[in-house]
Image (spheres, rainbow, N blue to C red):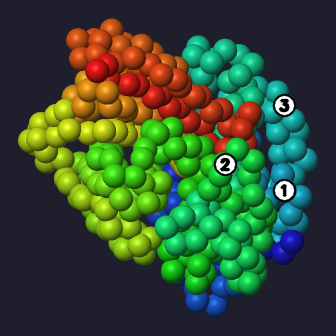
């Protein structure tokens, strides 16, 4: 592989924004990919994948390069040189690479790879937390899997088509997919591609949604005609899935504290041909109180640490703080306590997170069931998905039923 100056400069600029200006990696990569209209898919792939890979292994590469934050541009080039050397890419004779100690880099890599926090490139406190909550062996396997690049998974929109027809349509647009056992709505891309440019996407035949995330709406046990509340709807991946499971019959109330996210959901719903969603911004306690005792089903896709989806958001591990985890656990219990009041007697709710930590998952449910409001509920079943076992995102979901 030959390194091209303009692509390498794009990578360095992106790393500067992510590491020094604390911008989100996915947003930075989106901007970088629009930088030069002449870039082909291979060029864009190089920029995106290299940025993500270096973000993923920031700690390991920085340690080998012997540089510390805040990184100046020379530091970033040194990190880049480490990445290229370990990939077996020949460094061109640019000034940034003079005196790169190739042999020393490989030696340091072998040495540091024996220590998990360097090998998997994670802050000490996350490593300690993972061991404490999951145990040495499970954490070791899980955090290794969280450094693998995630597959692109699609969820078929059954309001418009079926899985077989979607597969054939994508095939006609040169995108090959395969079915996934135990995931009735999922297609996995055999090779990465820009699916958003396809006619199938423009026509609302599918959404991009990880296989684990697709299990959540199904877990809620919805039927056409019900009144469903999705209380942390965000941009609405699971909301849209609920609407399709309900065959557009009944009502889905999508709620979120961010109006901007609900606006995105509106656009997606139109493309999906979904017309049974009503959107409400949670700007006070009023919208919640109005729905007390009204919902047949409630989905709480709770805010969490996101430690189950580091494969998709590798920069999150550098942005997370121990205080955030403690605060988010308080938020989770408040959300459970307050929002569960919307479930009618005999109704059901799902509490879900994209975290793998028992303290955000099983423990939250246990604590809720002991609380005043929680005593009205029973746990029907729960499911924990670990990335190293499933190959998909880490997730947790619990189905609770309100006593009649």
The quarter in which the N terminus is drawn is bottom right
Label 1 sits on a secondary structure element that is loop
> Can residue 267 be spotted in the picture?
yes
- The residue that disc 2 covers is 183
Give the image location of residue 232, x and y in percent.
33, 44
Choose between 103 and 50: the one closer to the eye.
50
Label 3 sits on a secondary structure element that is helix
- The residue that disc 3 covers is 111
Q: Tag 3: Cα neighbours inside 10 Å, few (<14), some, or many (≥20)?
A: few
Give the image location of residue 365, x and y in percent.
41, 19
Choose between 239 and 310: the one closer to the eye.
239
Q: Tag 1: Cα neighbours inside 10 Å, few (<14), some, or many (≥20)?
A: few
Q: Are marks 3 and 1 in contact (CB under 8 Å)?
A: no
**Disc 2/disc 1 C-alpha distance (Å):** 35 Å
- The residue that disc 1 covers is 87
Could you tell me which residue is drawn at 73 percent across and 35 percent down? 388
Question: Does 100 appear above or below 203?
Answer: above
Q: Tag 2: Cα neighbours inside 10 Å, few (<14), some, or many (≥20)?
A: few
């Amino acid at each position: 592989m030959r390194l091209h100056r303009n692509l390498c400069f794009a990578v360095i600029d992106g790393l500067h924004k992510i590491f020094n200006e604390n911008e989100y990696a996915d947003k930075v990569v989106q901007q970088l990919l629009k930088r030069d209209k002449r870039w082909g898919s291979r060029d864009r792939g190089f920029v995106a994948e290299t940025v993500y890979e270096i973000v993923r292994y920031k700690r390991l590469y920085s340690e080998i390069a012997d540089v510390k934050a805040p990184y100046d541009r020379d530091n970033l080039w040194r990190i880049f040189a480490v990445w290229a050397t370990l990939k077996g890419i020949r460094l061109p004779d640019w000034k940034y690479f003079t005196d790169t100690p190739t042999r020393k880099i490989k030696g340091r890599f072998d040495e540091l790879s024996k220590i998990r926090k360097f090998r998997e490139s994670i802050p000490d406190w996350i490593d300690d937390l993972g061991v404490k909550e999951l145990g040495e062996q499970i954490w070791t396997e899980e955090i290794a899997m969280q450094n693998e690049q995630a597959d692109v998974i699609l969820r078929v929109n059954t309001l418009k088509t079926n899985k077989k027809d979607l597969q054939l349509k994508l095939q006609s647009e040169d995108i090959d997919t395969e079915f996934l056992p135990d995931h009735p709505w999922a297609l996995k891309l055999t090779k990465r591609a820009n699916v958003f440019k396809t006619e199938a996407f423009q026509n609302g035949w599918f959404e991009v949604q990880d296989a684990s995330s697709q299990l959540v709406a199904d877990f809620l046990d919805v039927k056409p005609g019900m009144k469903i509340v999705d209380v942390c709807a965000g941009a609405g991946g699971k909301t849209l899935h609920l609407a399709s499971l309900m065959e557009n019959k009944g009502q889905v109330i999508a709620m979120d504290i961010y109006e901007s996210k609900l606006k995105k959901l509106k656009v997606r719903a139109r493309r999906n041909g979904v017309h049974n969603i009503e959107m409400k911004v949670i700007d006070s306690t009023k919208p919640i109180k109005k729905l007390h005792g009204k919902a047949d089903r409630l989905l709480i896709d709770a805010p969490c640490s996101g430690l189950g989806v580091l494969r998709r958001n590798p920069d999150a591990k550098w942005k997370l703080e121990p205080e955030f985890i403690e605060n988010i656990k308080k938020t989770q219990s408040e959300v459970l306590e307050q929002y569960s009041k919307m479930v009618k007697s005999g109704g059901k709710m799902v509490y879900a997170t994209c975290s793998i930590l028992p303290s955000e998952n099983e423990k939250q449910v246990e604590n809720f069931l002991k609380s005043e409001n929680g005593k009205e509920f029973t746990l029907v079943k729960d499911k924990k998905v670990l990335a190293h076992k499933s190959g998909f995102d880490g997730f947790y979901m619990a189905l609770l039923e309100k006593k009649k």
